[in-house]
Image (cartoon, coloured by chain):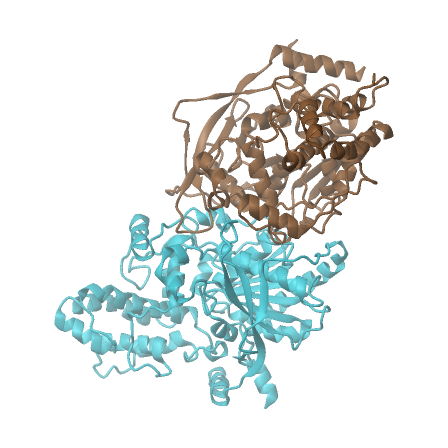
Chain colours: A cyan, B brown
Amino acid sequence: LASKTTILLWGLCASLGASVDIFKEYSFTTRVDHFAYHDERTYEMRYFVCDMYWKTGGGPVFFYTGSKDSFEDLITKTGVVQEWAPDFNALVVFAEHRFYGDSLPFGKSAFQSPAKLGYLTTEQALADYADLVLYLRRTLPGAERCPFVAFGGGYGGILAALLRIKYPHLIEAALSSSAPMRVFAGLTPCSAYLRAVTEAFERESAACAAAIRQSWALLESTASTNRGLRDLQKTFNLCQNIDRSRYSILRDWIHMAYETLARDNYADPSLSGSSLPPYPVKEACSLLTPSDSNGTAPLELVAGVTNLCYNFAGKLRCNDILNIPTSSYSMGFQKCTELVHPVCSDGVADMFYPSVWDQAQETEKCRKTYGVRSDITKGYLFFGGGNLPSASKVIFSNGDRDPWNVYGIKDPPSDETVVLVIEGAAHHEDLRFSSPNDSDALRTARSVAKNYIRQWIAETSNTSDTQPEIPEISQNSTSSRIESGPKYVLALLSAMALTALR
Amino acid sequence: LASKTTILLWGLCASLGASVDIFKEYSFTTRVDHFAYHDERTYEMRYFVCDMYWKTGGGPVFFYTGSKDSFEDLITKTGVVQEWAPDFNALVVFAEHRFYGDSLPFGKSAFQSPAKLGYLTTEQALADYADLVLYLRRTLPGAERCPFVAFGGGYGGILAALLRIKYPHLIEAALSSSAPMRVFAGLTPCSAYLRAVTEAFERESAACAAAIRQSWALLESTASTNRGLRDLQKTFNLCQNIDRSRYSILRDWIHMAYETLARDNYADPSLSGSSLPPYPVKEACSLLTPSDSNGTAPLELVAGVTNLCYNFAGKLRCNDILNIPTSSYSMGFQKCTELVHPVCSDGVADMFYPSVWDQAQETEKCRKTYGVRSDITKGYLFFGGGNLPSASKVIFSNGDRDPWNVYGIKDPPSDETVVLVIEGAAHHEDLRFSSPNDSDALRTARSVAKNYIRQWIAETSNTSDTQPEIPEISQNSTSSRIESGPKYVLALLSAMALTALR
């Protein structure tokens, strides 16, 4: 029944194309380099504001710290911020992360040179956000003494927590959802993550994980001949010929499909704008272990999974595995520099092929691809090595079905932090629009988080007298509505709201 | 009597030249730019270690955050760190600030180009210190889980507090002495500081401040003729001719003498390695308002004060007011960029000449001198605008006789911070060696601070089990004893220790 309702709602969103023009786009001029004075180059960072629920000066500002998604992708994954806004009389601001979406220092040429992409660092991104918060406080009537609450998911969850920790004078609280704070070398065994991905498939059936585990050898042997490579191109509907040198790209692409399905294993993927079907891992497993395979070759079954993951809506003529989106390029750069994320597998405890993590080799690969050196001390130097002793008024939430939760904060780092582990939930599922299909655990988690945020906002307001007035001073950063006039961005209404509308 | 004893002790230090070789010099290789990945240039930062009191692994590390002084100057001003070390079984580390002392990225050429000096920012300096702390934790046997306590005075006090606030996973507590956290535009009236300097002289006598107030017009009129300018050169024993265009340099130099005397108005200047006499403001006032002036011209009396301030030891043949030391050049750069410090005077409530603060004009001056733009939002963006809501385990101490205390934190920003306002004390006097002449207030302040630090260290040790192990990973930064072999640096023994030695 749950599944049926889900499908219905998903169908609703898709067929009605339900959307509201509730966000306005702005552009904020900020420094490319916040940490060197001779460099005065600036860039235009996009941010988006929904003010329809705001009681000017009487409500907080919900500040979403963008991460690897463009705003347009992000907005659909973070419905809770919009859902809560009316209850809090909140202003909602979404900030787009530098070098993602359309917030590109140096424009498209950013991706051609390490001297440009080099400014893609967490500290620079946090300084962008702090700069924007300061600007909003100074210029937006009623915002000066407002509590600002940061929200973020995944890498954005790291940013939300760090924005609160490093800029506590600008941000009063944070909801940090599915933030992999312990992703860094030495904090979590390199085998943990792919083991967790495997578990997502094992929960469907041991046979499903076994089918995947067995497929790699078959893939490998097929790819060992030119004829086999041609077969793979056809089986996986690739846009390009692949030769032996491109084989690992194909393999990584298949690998990533399982990771994505496990991460986005939602009852209602459409609620976050995804084109995946409900519970996509279950769907993948039913493709991989059909009751009657009718003699379908095992790699054909795997191709069914990649098609499910990458082209469920059927919009792609073929799979272009060589075309790396700029967002993946940027995230690859971050993983090669500061977000170094050791992953290994043995093909026994997990369903992948044996793969060791060799930092020297990875560093060399990064050097070749991006022209930069991996900095594996960064996780300890700047991110605290998973140790955030002075964090306060931060909620760290994780879904226990999300493979990324292996990197999450599980013990509250201080008395003033809250840890939520949400039974059955996938990757930052608590940030999404609510749905009638939400589990009790998810409902409770949202309710607990909401109450803490309400309490922390109240505490801030009680002490707001002691906050200094920000003087009217000329400043370096400016913001303007984009010149082409207001541009409205589509945002899905929550499923609950949709239900109410019917 | 107090004064007599003071003189005796001062005489002791000077005549015995008491010194101990307790610090060893090291060199640490760290990044010039911590916040951009394409830039892999490094520089050698000096740091100094005293391990004679350390109970390896059983005591804390006292980490002094250097500021505008070279280590050699700093060490004499910060005796308390050495005095407390035996009681805590502490290791003492002094880190030298980038672009000061001998810790010069780009060597001496740093001062020739904004593209080099541009990396002189607070965040870069803090990242240097954090990088060094991480390195020490990782490589020094017994240091990994040690509590690290930051100490700093003045600008260094800002750094000590911020190192704790921004890197709480590396630094467990801080003593931030005479830190001008509220120095930024809009937080403190621009008239406050020079009014406080004036009060230091008024406390000696109203006539003293009046004499200074009257001297400026005389200086101005004397400087209006070529003959007068020649007289000024002679009166103030200047090394160079001055013409009308250099007059303001002379005036600023005289101005600075009063500021320095008020700041360093110690009973025992020698305890901090200063060549000033005891209570130099009293001394200056007795020069300015002699019981019998014997017809000495007023500007001759003023010249007595500049001589007292700049050449009391009589080592200078003449005063070279055109030769700006590199440390002043670096500090000038910081005041022109992020530590923008608005100062004004009216010549009525204060003893100076009327002077308004015109930010546009100052910005233009900075642009001309350093080729950079002043960033007056920085104080709010990064330093919290005097608002440090999540600070914890930080002591903010200020001497109520120190003109810089007008910029100090006077209300504890949180339950876990301590504010000490020390009656009668001058600029970070609590950081200096103790002396039998110390006031009860100063003794008490030191004792309170010491107890808090002891308590916070104990609390840290109780929870050290939860700290993650820092893995052995190759890293970017290296440290080495300087190649020429160990170099020992002189440090004054405390006066108390001296007394004990007799």
Residue A419 in sight in this render: no
Residue A127 vertical position relative to residue B16 in the rendered view, above or below: below
Q: Quarter of the image holding residue A19?
A: bottom right
Residue A149 in sight in this render: yes
Asked whether B216 or B395 is in front, the reply is B216
Asked whether B499 or A13 is in front, the reply is B499
Looking at this view, name the residue that lies furthest to the top.
B502
Residue B199 vertical position relative to residue B3 in the rendered view, above or below: below
- The number of discs equals 0
Asked whether B108 or B158 is in front, the reply is B108
Say which quadrant the C terminus of chain B sits in: top right
Residue A488: where, in percent of width, then height?
55, 80
Left or right: where does residue A451 sit relative to residue A291? right
Question: Which residue is at 59% across, 38% downward?
Answer: B331
Question: Which residue is at 62% across, 10% downward?
Answer: B16
Residue A120 vertical position relative to residue B152 in the rendered view, above or below: below
Left or right: where does residue B393 sit relative to residue A58? left
Question: Which residue is at 32% across, 72% downward?
Answer: A208
Say which quadrant the N terminus of chain B sits in: top right
Residue B465: where, in percent of width, then height?
53, 42
Q: Quarter of the image holding residue A319?
A: bottom left
Residue B362: where, in percent of width, then height?
64, 48
Q: Quarter of the image holding residue A207?
A: bottom left
Residue B453: where, in percent of width, then height?
65, 35
Residue B487 vertical position relative to residue B252 in the rendered view, above or below: above
